[in-house]
């Protein structure tokens, strides 16, 4: 987009306002000017052009002699700038027959500067490859800048340099040997444009890469209770315990006052332990437990409050395992004191909320002599994720609240080999449960590839089926419904051409059981044994692989 402003001098030669064309692309400008001759004869003229930048520095100039016919003529020129173009000024001067015509043109180009993103870890380990990623773009990430030069410095020493690819990306593993923690500088350069940023990185040896875990015996304490703190220090990524590590422990109250300070040492299991007792008149609120050591810093929060144990509990029982939109939800509320007696005559308030916490309905009433209350409402239309917010108040004024989700169905299909493979009989598993997390045992109707069959889910909510996928099938669509057709679900999958297909003997294995599986070879050009062992190690990285038998699979 161009913004033009003209200062015009009237003479026998004129520069036509309507025939000035200025085209700019990044750093290149093309200007075409039409000079109009008001005389009926040819006029000899000397034309000069000077281009100024924002700082009024000359970045381009040109002179040319023209014979301007009675019909007029065009004078055009183009130039490239070494810097991004934002606002330029062009001064056009025409000298002829002791007259001078001057025109000044201001034009602005809305130029999108270069930008870049960096993804890097805060900690860098010596002699360990660290992933590093730079994305260079102009305006938005979907407009990459290719062949931009990337330079990575640490403490002013050049570590790496390279060029971005056609996606504007520069990916490389970063190796650091003897360098110390300090400032890392990234420079991005493309032509005359140059960007850079600096940030602090922590460089440490592999043995210094540790993580600290702080736990307490409970999250909430009463004044006067004893607090048990356990600290575990592990070396990352091996998760090995760090022995005899010195730690400084500090506990501060909600106002930042230190109430406990001690020095601890980890044992052979990487664990340090400390217990202390809270004062009876201690300030309530959140307390911070901080642990500091060499290359270690971590904190944990506990709450000290004067809370009361609930005098009674409440439970909600639904009449169905799950509900779908427009169905009637019925259930009962059961309230019972910790002594076992029912909460009779309790005031019940039940709010039905959608997941954005907007109230859709409200139910009130009283529990009967058995401490029970029945309720019903209609599940909202086309909506999943209804929340019940229940409040019960007994005759003494004690209030107990509870919040829970109304159960709704969720179904998944998982291909046994990880994906559906063409030209093979694929086994798949169906997982059916109600949210939050209750397995549903039922019969499900499934339609796929023109076939219809029933899959039975067990007590774990898992069922299985098989389908043959032809070589020409690119996508498969599962249409699933329960036997009463209370709900329907459509799932879509892509199909793949694979070299192997894995079949397990069972779908669930217990700890210590031997896992037996078959790997079918779909591409006979690949070595059977090597491919089978490679696939087995990919699936079971921590197990010992033993080949029992193998044969050549005939397609």
Image: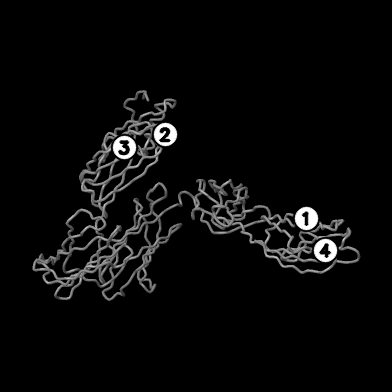
- Residue located 18% across and 60% down the image: 330
Q: Nearer the viewer, mark 2 or mark 4?
A: 4
Residue 450, labelled with which disc? 3
Residue 387 in the image: state x and y as whole percent. 27, 62
Q: Which of marks 1 and 2 is in front?
A: 1
**Label 2: which residue?**
497
Report, in whole angstroms, how far the alpha carbon at label 1 lies from the one at label 3: 68 Å
As drawn, 550 above or below 123: above
**Label 4: which residue?**
93
Instruction: Report helix, strand or loop for mark 4.
Output: strand
Instruction: Report helix, strand or loop for mark 2.
Output: loop
Splitting the image into 4 quarters, where does residue 375 fall? bottom left
Report, in whole angstroms, how far the alpha carbon at label 1 lies from the one at label 2: 59 Å
Residue 540 in the image: state x and y as whole percent. 35, 38
Residue 87 in the image: state x and y as whole percent. 69, 64
Badge 2: how crowded within 10 Å, few (<14), some, or many (20+)? some
Q: In this view, does 418 lie to the left or right of 198?
A: left
**Decide: marks 1, 2 in contact (CB < 8 A)?**
no
Badge 4: how crowded within 10 Å, few (<14), some, or many (20+)? some
Q: Quadrant of the N terminus?
A: bottom right
Q: Nearer the viewer, mark 3 or mark 4?
A: 3
């Amino acid at each position: 987009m161009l913004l033009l402003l003209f200062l015009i001098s009237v003479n026998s030669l004129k520069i036509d306002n309507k025939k000035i064309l200025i085209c700019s692309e990044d750093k290149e400008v093309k200007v075409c000017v039409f000079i109009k001759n008001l005389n009926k004869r040819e006029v000899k003229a000397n034309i000069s052009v000077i281009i100024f930048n924002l700082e009024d520095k000359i970045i381009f100039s040109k002179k040319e002699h023209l014979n301007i016919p009675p019909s007029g003529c065009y004078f055009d020129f183009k130039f490239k700038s070494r810097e991004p173009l934002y606002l330029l000024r062009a001064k056009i001067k025409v000298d002829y027959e002791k007259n001078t015509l001057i025109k000044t043109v201001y034009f602005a180009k809305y130029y999108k500067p270069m930008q870049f993103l960096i993804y890097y870890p805060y900690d860098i380990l010596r002699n360990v490859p660290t992933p590093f990623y730079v994305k260079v773009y102009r305006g938005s990430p979907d407009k990459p800048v290719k062949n931009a030069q990337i330079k990575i410095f640490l403490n002013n020493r050049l570590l790496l340099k390279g060029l971005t690819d056609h996606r504007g990306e520069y990916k490389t593993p970063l190796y650091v040997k003897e360098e110390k923690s300090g400032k890392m500088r990234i420079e991005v350069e493309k032509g005359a444009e140059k960007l850079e940023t600096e940030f602090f990185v922590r460089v440490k040896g592999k043995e210094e890469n540790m993580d600290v875990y702080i736990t307490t015996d409970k999250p909430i304490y009463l004044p006067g209770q004893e607090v048990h703190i356990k600290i575990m220090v592990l070396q990352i990524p091996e998760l090995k315990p760090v022995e005899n590590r010195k730690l400084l422990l500090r506990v501060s109250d909600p106002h930042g006052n230190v109430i406990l300070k001690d020095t601890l040492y980890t044992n052979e299991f990487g664990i340090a332990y400390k217990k202390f007792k809270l004062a009876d008149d201690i300030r309530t609120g959140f307390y911070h437990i901080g642990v500091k050591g060499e290359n270690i810093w971590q904190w944990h929060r506990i709450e000290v409050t004067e809370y009361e144990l609930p005098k009674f509990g409440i439970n909600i029982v639904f009449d169905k395992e799950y509900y779908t939109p427009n169905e009637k939800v019925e259930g009962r509320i059961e309230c019972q004191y910790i002594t076992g007696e029912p909460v009779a005559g309790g005031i019940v308030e039940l709010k039905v909320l959608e997941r954005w916490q907007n109230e859709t309905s409200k139910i009130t009433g009283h529990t009967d002599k058995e401490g029970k209350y029945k309720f019903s409402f209609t599940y909202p239309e086309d909506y999943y994720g209804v929340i019940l917010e229940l409040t019960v108040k007994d005759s003494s004024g004690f209030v107990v609240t509870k919040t829970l989700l109304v159960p709704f169905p969720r179904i998944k299909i998982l291909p046994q080999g990880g994906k559906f493979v063409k030209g093979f009989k694929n086994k798949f598993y169906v997982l059916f449960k109600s949210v939050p997390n209750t397995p549903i045992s039922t019969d499900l109707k499934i339609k796929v590839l023109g076939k219809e069959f029933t899959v039975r889910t067990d007590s774990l909510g898992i069922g299985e089926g098989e389908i043959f996928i032809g070589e020409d099938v690119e996508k498969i669509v599962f249409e699933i419904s329960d036997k009463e057709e209370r709900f329907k679900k459509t799932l879509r999958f892509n199909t793949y051409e694979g070299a192997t297909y894995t079949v397990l003997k069972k779908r669930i294995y217990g700890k210590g059981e031997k896992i037996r599986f078959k790997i079918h070879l779909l591409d006979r050009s690949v070595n059977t044994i090597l491919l089978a062992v490679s696939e087995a190690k990919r699936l079971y990285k921590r197990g010992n692989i033993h080949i029992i038998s193998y044969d050549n699979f005939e397609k």
